[in-house]
Amino acid sequence: MNIARELVPQGKLKPLFEDPLKLPFGRHFTDHMFTMEYAPATGWGNPRITPYGPLVLDPSANVFHYSQEVFEGQKAYKAHNGEILLFRPLENARRLNRSLRRLCMPEIPEDIFLQAECELLKQEKRWIPGLKGTSLYIRPTVIGTEAALGIKSSSDYLFFIILSPVGPYFKEGFDPISLRVSDTYSRAGSGGTGEAKTGGNYAGSLLATREATQQGYSQVLWLDAGEHRYVEEVGAMNIFFVIDGKLVTPALGGTILHGITRKSVLELAPDLGIASEERRISIDEVVEGIASGKVSEVFGAGTAAVISPVGKIGYRGTDSVINGNRTGPWAKKFFDTLTAVQYGEVQDTHGWVYVVK
Ligand SMILES: *Cc1c(COP(=O)(O)O)cnc(C)c1O
């Protein structure tokens, strides 16, 4: 793929954020973005790197009315030797294509996706902060752009990648978050789009999240839509429990997002010496297990926080406190191990690290 470039003149480049450790999530964007268009007659084409800026779209464009939109979330890390590292980027390419298929949108060849990311990252290398805990967040997105009302799949699409330097997710130490179980709202139903990474899933979750934060919780713990009985996942994270010394996470069944952090935690478990199981977990088992001490730890897993310990779960007006609201040893072990791999500090025995060349 031959990528055209229209670059910001040297003297007009944006200043870097002074203290990368204080960077807020997703507020600052780099100088350039990648775009590529799809038309039915020609397929994907016109790849280019241009100054970061607003898109011009027709008000009748599909994405505004029928929400053909899918995205990914990844991070680029700077290793001590200056190399740019990605974590399992082919998994993101594959998941993007699964999401695209589900939303009836055209797939993007994996090598084209990866090349687009690498070329943009090399162009924007000065934006990768480099301190442990900081990274350059990558947001590849595809939207339907055909200008036409009337419900149907768009004929035309835009693929873009934007980059945002981000600081550590945990500003003051590795502190547990609190979750509110929603037993009225649902995130995803059987046969729906729950396992696609699409904006619509998030739009439907915002009201429940607002109600949870108004009550002092950080995020929503979603249950299955059918019975409101089985635990599914958190806002943008998969969920893990340590039950009787075993790592347990809800089995994927169409409504739960296939998290790459989730997959990596499961694949690391044998290395770290903990047995793991994917199965159904009822909220009653969780609440009773916390009360009896069988559930010793709960943590979320996702790209943004990597591992996020959970200290409190609110369900039907009662809070269950896990491990005295302190970070447990397994959350810490998985966090330390995954981040050491991501920053290239330890040998990558799983072949997860991808060096941008
Ligand atoms: C992105 C996402 C996750 C986490 O996936 P990772 O690949 O680990 O970042 C979990 N749940 C939802 C709903 C998500 O959108």
Image (cartoon, helix red, strand yellow):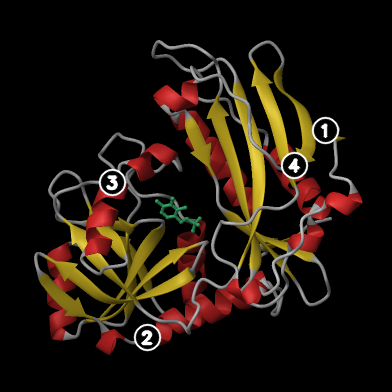
Comparing marks 1 and 3, which lies closer to the viewer?
Answer: 3
Q: CA distance from mark 2 to mark 3?
A: 28 Å
Q: CA distance from mark 1 to mark 4?
A: 9 Å
* N-terminal label among 1 and 3: 1
Q: CA distance from mark 1 to mark 2?
A: 47 Å
Q: Identify the residue at horizontal 79%, vertical 39% (top origin).
A: 49
Which residue is under mark 4?
A: 116
Q: CA distance from mark 1 to mark 3?
A: 38 Å
Q: Residue 255: horizontal and vertical position, in percent?
A: 32, 45
Which residue is under mark 3?
A: 187
**In the displayed structure, would residue 209 be above or below residue 246?**
above
Visible residue check, residue 92: yes
Which residue is under mark 2?
A: 328
* N-terminal label among 2 and 3: 3
Q: Residue 148: horizontal and vertical position, in percent?
A: 49, 11
Depth check: 235 or 17 in front?
Answer: 17
